[in-house]
Image (tube, rainbow, N blue to C red):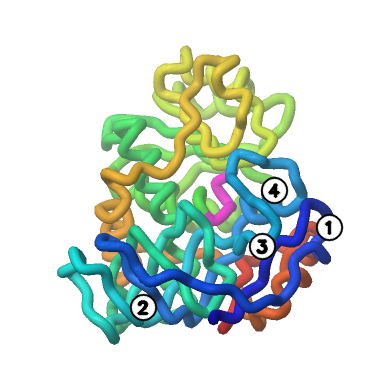
Amino acid sequence: MSRAVVLTGFGRPEVLRPAEVTIAEPGPTQIRIAARLSGVGPTDLAIRSGALKAFPTPPGTVLGFETAGIVESVGSHVDDVTVGDEVAAMLPGLGGYADLVLADFWVRKPDQVSWEDAAALPASGEAAVRVLNQLAVTGSDTLLILGGAGSVGTIATQIAAARGARVITAVRRQDFAAVQKLGASPVEYGPDLTAAVGRIGAVDAVFNAATGSDLAAAVQIAGGPARVITLSNHTAAEHGVRLSGPDPAGANAALQEAMTRLADGSLTLRSHTAVPLADAAAAHARLEAGERTKYLLSM
């Protein structure tokens, strides 16, 4: 049995409750991880509230898209890690709010990367690298990132800039200094976004890493929907925009790129705060109240 926090229904954070759950043995291409820390992301909050029902979440579901810990057992076809190795894992099928976690996609944790950073990286790092690759961002591009101060946007800004792209990011005015340090030119997100971006210059591609984004404006700014990608706006099809989800074929390579940059110091993450696993509901409540930190659940 594994200690976990489970979803008992949709609603306020109190629907998250401690429980004991059974975690299966790993399948042939899976590993099972004794988790040290697991990340809490905005999609977790959307699932729990009932706002996002794209994931099968019957009562008893364990939320969490990312974790870091020690390999506890491996499937018969796994040959790149062994029991005792330190890893970080992305969990597109959920399961992170537990002290034992099954994973399909992982990367080794280098010694110089802290457990906190390792746990905070996988979901956001994979998403950032994936969408930049899908947009085919190169050094000749100007990229607009909507939500550049968030976990995904922070990573995407740094990687795009490292690839030589010019990065413009739409954020709140109080985040201007932070995103400038990451290598981006900030504009204030609001009803005048198109004009604000236009004053800086033409845009080749738009990466929407924000919730509640204006995809119509994004398409207008990019000169069409072909190079506009969103992570979370489910009106994407109405605008001809691609809604990007985890890519199994490229997930491990994306995780490796993000982890390598983190290890060599060319990538920094948003600040994070660790709390006990039992405080998962409280972490959700604080995030919904407007706290701007990345919460990690400590096992």
Rounded to the nearest whole Å, what is the CA distance between mark 3 and mark 1?
16 Å
Q: Earlier in the sequence, mark 2 or mark 3?
A: 3
Q: Earlier in the sequence, mark 4 or mark 1?
A: 1
Say which mark, if any, is on residue 12.
Answer: 1
Rounded to the nearest whole Å, what is the CA distance between mark 2 and mark 4?
29 Å
Residue at image coords 55%, 18% = 237
Q: Position of residue 254 (x, y in %)?
A: 30, 52
Note whether residue 261 is visible.
no
Q: Nearer the viewer, mark 4 or mark 3?
A: 3
Q: Position of residue 190 (x, y in %)?
A: 72, 32
Name the amino acid type tagged 4: Ala
Give the magenta part as a residue range.
147-151
Instruction: Say whether residue 120 is left or right of residue 141.
Output: right
What residue is shown with label 2? 113
What residue is shown with label 4? 46
Name the amino acid type tagged 3: Gly
